[in-house]
Amino acid sequence: MRKGFLIASSMEERLDTTGKRDRITIHDVAAAAGISISTASKALNDTGRMGLETRERVKRIAAEIGYRPNALARGLLSKRSFTIGLLTNDTYGRFTLPVMAGISDALVDHGVSVFLCAIEEDPTLAQIHVEAMLDKQVDGIIATGKRLDRRLPLDLSNLNVPVVYAFTEGAPGSVTFRSDDAQGARLAIEWLAKLGRKRIVHVTGPENFFSVRERADAYRKVAGEERPVLFGVWSENWGHEAVARLWSGSGEKPDGIFCGNDQIARGIIDALRERGIRVPQDVSVVGFDNWEIVAAQTRPPLTTVDMELKELGRQAGLTVLALAEGRSVEPGIRKLPCRLVVRQSCGGDTLGI
């Protein structure tokens, strides 16, 4: 009861004559907890020597009365802005949104906000946004995009803040995070083989994409060098066309199809159904991306490889935070493993391998 009274009293004291509430300060936290301002500050900032129970009690009371640290004052003391810039040319958001979700998850507990700027392919616009980020004194920048083998249209290598790259080509000597496409392809082929599929083909996107070549190489190493790869475009229409090619030719037809993305896979499944070919009874199909809006709505729902972009963003966020805090980070490319999400399009009943 006494604790509740202290909190209520403190809150009442923060009302001005107009009935509006002033900002809750550390003075209120100290009064509500019955401790000195110095002790309250140490508890909230995880400094000083005190019992864990006391520290947690102060933090709980601070949350109950609505105390929020003054970001400006905190920045002045630490010489940081507690903001990270996120720069992307993926204006559609297919890859950037899950990466950003991971970044936010990683940074929110550290009181760091994310400042997103979309630059398309315009170097002038990119320069404007970078200058705006620097004017806001961001603690670091994460660059992300829509291809692993393309850089953003701006050189970020000589900035006075740390830069981390995620799902885009990084500058020499930088820290770059990317999904392990070869490992993801192996997951898909090995799963099809485990299901007893022996005539597996690979239908994918343009051969000039690094990720396409990496997945195709991994496919051939597992399925056999003689197995066919059909290169095309990232679309459902290409999936329809690929089925027409495969079923109009001579020889045995595929009993398993590994697709370069979920859109191609959806087109293939629709085309097979139109021919009276059952999925997965006659042909098993696996996609790549785990794009939920496509994979879950495909009929039957699509087994696919998840590139774990949220985890990729989380790792990038933690790394840029470490660099902003002055910690040493070894440069280089970090490949994060993919995950196979099993649905009904190829058989099996495990929701994630």
Image (tube, helix red, strand yellow):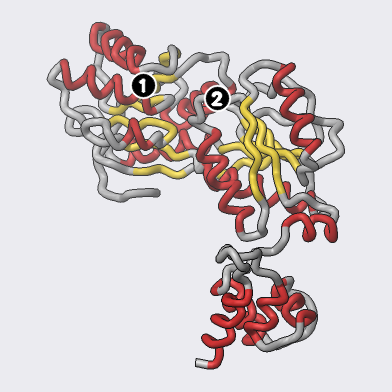
Residue located 32% across and 42% down the image: 194
Residue located 25% across and 8% down the image: 250
Q: Position of residue 90 (x, y in %)?
A: 56, 26
Please identify the residue farthest to the left as the structure is shown. 276
Q: Position of residue 284 (x, y in %)?
A: 26, 31
Q: Amino acid at mark 2?
A: Thr
Give whichever of discs 2 and 1 has the lower sequence position: 2
Please identify the residue farthest to the bottom as the structure is shown. 2
Q: Position of residue 348 (x, y in %)?
A: 26, 45
Q: Which residue is mark 2?
A: 91
Q: Which residue is mark 1?
A: 264
Judge whether 20 appears above or below 322 on screen. below
Front in this rendered view, residue 149 or 38 = 38
Front in this rendered view, residue 201 or 300 = 300
Residue located 82% across and 31% down the image: 157
Judge whether 78 appears above or below 219 on screen. below
Judge whether 313 appears above or below 13 on screen. above
- The answer to whether residue 195 of the structure is visible from this angle is yes
Callouts 2 and 1 close, C-beta under 8 Å: no
